[in-house]
Image: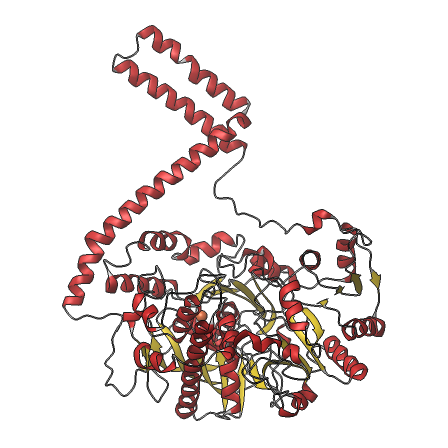
Amino acid sequence: MPAPRNVLGISAYYHDAAAALLQDGKIVCAAQEERFTRRKNDADFPTNAIQFCLRYAKLVPAQLDTVVFYDKPVMKFARLLETYLAVAPGGWRTFPTVLSNWLGEKLDLRKTIRARLPGLRANCQILFAEHHQSHAASAFYPSPFNEAAILTVDGVGEWATTTIGHGQGHQIQPLKELRFPHSLGLLYSAFTDYCGFRINSGEYKLMGLAPYGEPKFADAIRRELVDVKPDGSFRLNLDYFNFLRGVTMTNGRFHQLLGGPPRQPEGKIDHRHMDVARSIQLVTEEIMLHLAHHAREVTGSRNLCLAGGVALNCVANGLILRERIFDRVWIQPAAGDAGGALGAALAAWHWHPDTPARATGPDDAMQSSLLGPEFSDPEIEAVLHRHGVVFQKLQGSALLDCAVDLLKAGKVVGWFQGRTEFGPRALGNRSILGDARLPHMQSVINLKVKFRESFRPFAPVVRRECVADYFELDADSPYMLFTAPLRSELRKPLPAGVTGMDLLKAGRSTVPAITHVDYSARVQTVAHAGNPLLYDLLLRFERATGCGVLVNTSFNVRGEPIVCTPDDAYRCFTNTEMDFLIMGSYVIERTAGRNGFRAAAMQPRPVEMKPDLKDGPGEWRKSGLKTALGLVILSSVLRWRHILTNDLWLGALVLPGIVAICAWWQPHWFRGLHRLLTRLGLAISQFIGRLLLLFFFFFILTPVGLILRLAGKDALQLRPPREATTYWQPAKAYGPLDRLF
Ligand SMILES: [Fe+2]
């Protein structure tokens, strides 16, 4: 049987839904659903991302040979049920919602995929990889290594939260795992939540806040919250957490340990929050270092591949690199669940026995992670005309020289070129660029352009050849996934006695806009082959100014996904105080009025709502006819109970007759009635459904859970013995992909 030619990978239903397409094993395209729907971290089935992949490859669903989902839904559902068994009657508040979500389209995913992708052939394989198998595949197969240790660390998949595996050629062998609820991702998210940031997207903010604080709570975290063994395995003390019950992440004991209640979102950030952030960051770094050392020990490999949400912690990654535990470290740029779509597709491709030998070279297979949609000059120009924008068209050297002049003059420039990045970082195609030498650049971009917290640092982008001139780093970092210290000769001493946010006002270095208060920077290196346009821009900027570093931050405002289309970029530009937008070959200046910005363009694009009910003339007609039938039945019952006389009953039958005739000939008259009846029916069925689920929870699941606990059956291993030398468990070989569990 030949290897599948077209393989589509999908991730969805947790956070960051995405789709990725392979053709003959080559990564052709990949994109996150949020970029299309404009809903940050959109977790819905990635209909738009799939449509993009098919359109990009000029395919129709019937040409797909394999569709693969990034986790095993039945295993995940079983874990959910076992969690409720372990905590019942706790968890009753979330049980009806969680169960009704699952009993919908999430559990029977084969059916869902076929329903959402009409036109799939009957013999198109629908496969399911394990969650950490998808992460491991996304880390190993696109890496430049033929052999490597693979470490995946995230919140949770089916059961595993952390795994160590070994990759060689086509094969990935899982070796060890830590299981739910003992999760470094969930621990970090609990602190993210406690510090008032959004789980699954605010972890970066917590990491950015950490350098302002002191690790005053690190000992308390190590003593009370997480027990870490020298081999990196750990267990959480669940007496301090609430996430098993699903309502909040942490409880009163946790808050007491950290000296106060959680910070409210948008609340003031004080020194305690900074100290909490520093403390959990330090403990996370320690665990990641232990994990990396242990992965080296058990695999003997000199190469490391990393993925999973925690692999986006670039401070911990930078430490692993600098400790030289491995000769080389490669991290999947879409290390979170979006990358699971790609990993699942790669796992399915390499699972096939007739797949040709895997070729590796000096470069990875991610194509700089520029895998999303792109727009031609005519497409961009059409958008600009539609918005009535005055622009200048420049090409080649003239465009780059113009950009350099603007940056040199201290302007903030939106930079929209080529294909959209896949993964959470903007890598120079959907970026906002600025001069890193200017002391005010960080606060200007944060407050006037991105409308976000002023404490957050920006990343530098630098040509690969000269990264060591600026940073204590001489390795590839194309995906902005390693932090490195700034070279000491570029630093400026911090004024004595200045702490907290006041450090922001200090100069810090000759490139202050990208220097964090601890002199670190989240570095992106650019090779000419990876992104020639950005490389040339950096080269020209260096020739013009003597500085080869630019600020590179994502092209979006706070709370919105990175822009995808020229329209998104233009809207973002008009809604901020960015000075210039360079989109393809077009240069647009912010001088409202003269350029004729239209008020309409200033409005954010409305989020497209998915319809929650069937609507249309046919449905309205049916509702009208059902109403007429209901009236006939009602009047007949009233007649039967002698409430109506015979004459009145016959007279009353005229009304349903009129209703039926009107419904047939003028169905739109019944549009409002149809919507009302449908919503009412939905609400009643949801209410009854919730009641039934609660009945099941209290009268079946809770007694069974209590009996199991009394019998000492601890399905979740909530408290593995502390005296054990390790918390690692041997990992089972991955099951066949054609099974849901
Ligand atoms: Fe994950």
Residue 556, quarter of picture: bottom right
Colour scheme of the rendered structure: secondary structure
| Image: 409 above or below 112 | below
Whether residue 130 appears in this view of the structure is: no
Q: Position of residue 173 (x, y in %)?
A: 41, 82
Q: Report the residue at 43% width, 83% height from top.
A: 288
Q: Quadrant of the C terminus?
A: bottom left
Describe residue 459's horizontal placement relative to residue 648 as left or right.
Answer: right
Using the image as rendered, state which of residue 671 and residue 220 is in the foreground.
Answer: 220
Tell me what residue is drawn at x 27 percent, y 70 percent: 239
Q: Residue at x 23, y 48 (%)?
A: 695
Residue depicted at x 20% and y 54% = 700
Q: Nearer the viewer, residue 329 or 130?
A: 329
Q: Is residue 332 above or below residue 414?
A: below
- Taking the image as four quarters, which one is ligand 1 found in? bottom left
Query: Where in the figure is residue 348, as x and y percent of width and height?
Result: 48, 71
Left or right: 367 in relation to 704: right
Q: Nearer the viewer, residue 489 or 494?
A: 494
Report which quarter residue 93 is drawn in. bottom left
Q: Position of residue 61 (x, y in %)?
A: 56, 57
> Residue 462 location in percent, x, y?
68, 82
